Amino acid sequence: MKLYSMKQAVNPQRVRIFLAEKGLDIETEEIDIPSGQNREESFLSVNPRGLLPALVLDDGTVLHESVAICRYIEGVHPEPCLLGATPKEQAIIDMRQREMEFDGLQSIAWIFRNTAPHFAARSHPGAVPDMAQLPDLAARGQILAALWFERLNESLESQEFVAGDSYSIADITAFCAVLFARWVKMPIPDHHSHTQRWFAAMKERPSAKA
């Protein structure tokens, strides 16, 4: 297998942490998104969407969605279980993972993509036509990301991890979203003690450095 990744990019980081939790070390090639390397033919021949990460399997199959890659890895290497062992666990983890992705990561991405100077003409990720930044979309992202932080803190008041009593892919996505939020000057609010506790524990995991 070969993973196309970028060290500073949030979605590749999700997959790298997942692999690290599984104790897997696979061949990786770095693709630089700010310089546009992901839109060059050499990478588009791997993933025509121009998005990272992309995992090329030994038979040539390309997986290019973060959760799809993680599902494949879980199927091949089921331990430790990060996607749930029972139908109920799987449903809860999937539900929470999607909340972290769409309410958290997406909102923060709207802020970042519509304010970062080097994406002034590339506000939408991947191999798509150039698009100007939209200040209103960044403002919407600010409101929704703040709401996501509030809800995350509330949920962590009664449970140790994002999806319940066990570490899962939902924690990985939430952790990466919190790190990403720092890029747009949105740290965890000081009064969010439950999220602060959870985040401190996440940083202590060896996989956090992946």
Image (tube, rainbow, N blue to C red):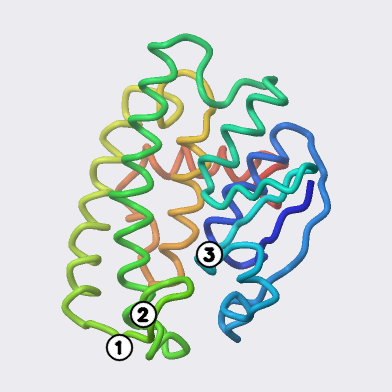
- Kindly identify the amino acid type of the residue bearing the numbered disc 2: Ser
Marks 3 and 1, how far apart in space? Answer: 19 Å
User: Residue at image x 39%, y 61%?
Assistant: 187
Secondary structure beneath dot 3 equals loop
Secondary structure beneath dot 1 equals loop
Relative to residue 137, is residue 105 depicted above or below? Answer: above
Relative to residue 135, is residue 56 depicted above or below? Answer: above
- Asked if the residue under mark 3 is in contact with the one under mark 2, i.e. CB atoms within 8 Å, the reply is no
- Kindly identify the amino acid type of the residue bearing the numbered disc 1: Ala
Sequence order check, earlier mark of 3 and 1? 3
User: Residue at image x 44%, y 19%?
Assistant: 90
Horizontal side, residue 46 vs residue 176: left or right: right
Residue at image mark 1: 132
Secondary structure beneath dot 2 equals loop
| Image mark for residue 123 | 2
User: Residue at image x 46%, y 18%?
Assistant: 165
Residue at image mark 3: 51
Relative to residue 159, is residue 177 depicted above or below? Answer: below
Marks 2 and 3, how far apart in space? Answer: 14 Å
- Asked if the residue under mark 2 is in contact with the one under mark 1, i.e. CB atoms within 8 Å, the reply is yes
